Image (spheres, helix red, strand yellow):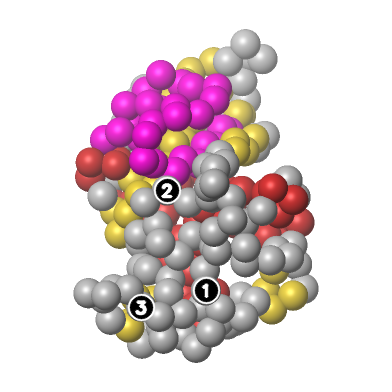
Amino acid sequence: MNYLLLVVALAVGCSADFGSSGQNGIINAHNTLRSKIAKGTYVAKGTQKSPGTNLLKMKWDSAVAASAQNYANGCPTGHSGDAGLGENLYWYWTSGSLGDLNQYGSAASASWEKEFQDYGWKSNLMTIDLFNTGIGHATQMAWAKSNLIGCGVKDCGRDSNGLNKVTVVCQYKPQGNFINQYIYVSGATCSGCPSGTSCETSTGLCV
């Protein structure tokens, strides 16, 4: 049986949707990671990963983004549990002004990807033991079959700790982080692109 695993991330440090700069920052961070994996150049905590056959290029999806923004607007403290969607959460606190909320899309993505650098990436097969190493946000970013993403951001005002807080919610479709499924398939770059897709040679991703 496959089980979906979701995690949350914390980072120390008026509501608005992500604008084009925020969206591009998120998409670029995800596809840069995925391209490095696909080409076999990604290094996780000193270990170079094997190239990937089947990583899809991520695209922004307005319906998924609307779902993520709707959830972010409630300043959540845990996962939505929305059916059929993967989800990464990020919070940031600061005593100063939050500034342009678009910056937090790339900041959230960098925080999630950093899990591979902090904890390593020992296997491409998602297991409970692998998940429990603390890389669940990063593996959702890398999940080969997840090709649609949408994110929301919310200025949640002053928190109970007296600091200004921003919340970022990114949702993914199809969802990833299923136990006993592969994050991606190792092999020659693009050699396993799904039916109906082809290799984008510049990125090594299936489009």
Residue 128 coordinates in the image, percent (x, y): 69, 48
Distance (Cα) linking label 3 and label 1: 10 Å
Residue at disc 3, secondary structure: loop
Left or right: residue 202 versus residue 10 is left
Q: Which residue is mark 2?
A: 175
Left or right: residue 183 versus residue 10 is left
Whether residue 99 is visible here, answered yes or no, is no
Q: Could you say which disc has been placed on residue 193 in the image?
A: 3
Residue 170 coordinates in the image, percent (x, y): 42, 42
Residue 174 coordinates in the image, percent (x, y): 37, 51
Magenta stretch?
A: 66-92
Q: Residue 139 occupies which quadrant of the picture?
A: bottom right
Residue at disc 2, secondary structure: loop
Residue at position x 49%, y 60% from top? 143
Q: Is residue 67 above or below residue 194?
A: above
Q: Is residue 156 above or below residue 88?
A: above
Residue at position x 22%, y 74% from top? 196
- Looking at the figure, which quarter contains the C terminus? bottom left
Determine the residue located farthest toward the front in the rendered image.
1
Residue 184 coordinates in the image, percent (x, y): 52, 68
**Neighbour tally class for label 1: few under 14, some 14-19, many 20 plus, Cα within 10 Å:** many
Residue at disc 1, secondary structure: loop
As shown in the figure, which amino acid type bears the numbered disc 3?
A: Cys
Distance (Cα) linking label 2 and label 1: 17 Å
Left or right: residue 106 versus residue 113 is left
Q: Could you say which disc has been placed on residue 185 in the image?
A: 1
As shown in the figure, which amino acid type bears the numbered disc 1?
A: Val
Residue at position x 32%, y 27% from top? 70
